[in-house]
Image (spheres, rainbow, N blue to C red):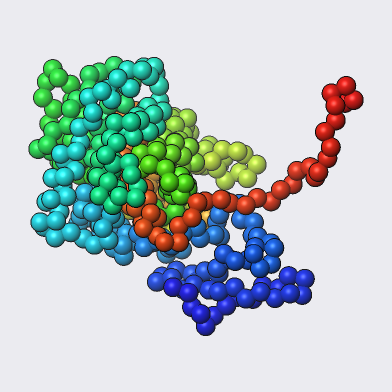
Amino acid sequence: MADTTRTATLTIDGQTYDLPMHSPSVGPDVIDITKLYGQAGVFTHDPGFTSTSSCESSITYIDGIKGELLHRGYPIDQLAEKSHYLEVCYLLLYGELPSAAELETFESTITRHTMIHEQMHNFFRGFRRDAHPMATMVGVVGAMSAFYHDSTDITDERQREIASHRLIAKMPTIAAMAYKYSIGQPFVYPRNDLSYAANFLRMCFAVPAEEYVVDPVLERAMDRIFTLHADHEQNASTSTVRLASSSGANPFACIAAGIACLWGPAHGGANQACLEMLKEIGSVDRIPEYIARAKDKDDPFRLMGFGHRVYKNFDPRAKVMKQSADEVLELLGVENNPLLQVAKELERIAVNDAYFIEKKLFPNVDFYSGIILEAMGFPTSMFTPIFAVSRTVGWISQWKEQLADPAMKIGRPRQLYMGETLRDYVEIEDR
């Protein structure tokens, strides 16, 4: 809420303007510039929106200095340790942790929405076999609006609820089908007797010729990956979903837009880029060479999987993910995997190196999640689709919150125009 007793004063050419200030429940105060252009005829310039609040939200809070991530006030490490993904989904969607009865109903609803319309299978077969699974997901999720007409009216609260459940439930199925199609194996249908994480692993790795039993350690690790990526405030893909939603687009189109944005290597593709870096390093004995390159300001090489745009401390999600990585590697006995040997040695060196400590380049969640997914047997092309499965609930929660916000208006950023001024058209023979 605005603190009407406090204002910030801006002086332009001797003229002063009082700008109201807002005090959040936690975090730095905010100067409201909504009426600045109308009053002063100027607007602000903020590439990347690093100092601009685009909305009011009560879902997720990040303190990058402290290394803190809260979902509805609950620390992410507590949720990852004591809760599970679908309970966190309920929390993000509805604002409170569910009772036992509410959780049972919610889990049942999600479980019974996991199958997709049978005709949608034809969409997959229209893609080339070597299509990136993210390309497939963008197309298939966007096409859901052609199949689920009863949940595209954003003015209907019940339809918004149904669309939310469908997207959370069907995204693992769509991602698994994209993977199966890319490797030439038959689709595996979901099973209602399995957990969200176990169902996804089975749909990815089972084949009709034999039974597939999900190991509880892998199931827990997969659930943690989903939980730790569920939401992350106003990141690029979430802001994309909100911007698409501001135009009144249907929920499936909005989430498809989020998936497209997530595909970028600077965002959801970071864990894939991290594994590709480990492959480039190749062996433990080459690590010093790459450490030296990372420290050389004239070398374009970047140490992927270390540091974070927001966190200037240890990524709180990385602490939990490291525990899962250790458990998975021990279970699978992959100590002799050269790629994972490089990862573990690189981690050991970096967390003890004065340069990386000073620059706060700690291993982040992408570093450890990539190690886990590699050990599980996922190709790097599936890392970002798995991220999309995880983040769907965050996108949906932000989408629902925005639609309920009376202050919502269509997104329309301004620009600092540096092009040509007015000039007359010149006929082609006179040029």
Which picture quadrant has residue 327?
A: top left
Specify the farthest residue to the bottom. 5
In what quadrant of the picture does the C terminus appear? top right
Q: Quadrant of residue 205?
A: top left
Give the vertical position of 165 relative to 315 (above or below): above
Position of 230 with respect to 102 (left or right) is right
Q: Where residue 420 sits: x, y (%)?
A: 79, 42
Q: Is residue 341 above or below residue 41?
A: above
Q: Position of residue 103 (x, y in %)?
A: 15, 53
Where is residue 101 shown, x and y percent of the image? 10, 56
Report the number of numbered marks.
Answer: 0
- Viewed as shown, does residue 85 lie left or right of 194? right
* Residue 99 visible in the displayed image: yes
From this viewpoint, which residue is outermost toward the right?
430
**Which residue is at 16% across, 40% downward?**
111
Classify 320 as above or below 343: below
Q: Nearer the viewer, residue 382 or 145?
A: 145
Q: Residue at x 52, y 38 (%)?
A: 290
Which of 431 and 70 lies nearest the eye of the viewer? Answer: 431
Q: Is residue 257 left or right of residue 115?
A: right
Whether residue 221 is visible here, answered yes or no, is: no
Q: Is residue 210 above or below residue 291?
A: above
**Which residue occupies the foreground of this view, 391 or 331?**
391
For the point 19% across and 43% down, the residue is 110
Residue 106 in the figure: left or right of residue 143: left
Query: At which x and y percent is residue 301?
Result: 56, 38
Residue in the image at 69% along x and 67% along y: 40
Q: Quadrant of the N terminus?
A: bottom left
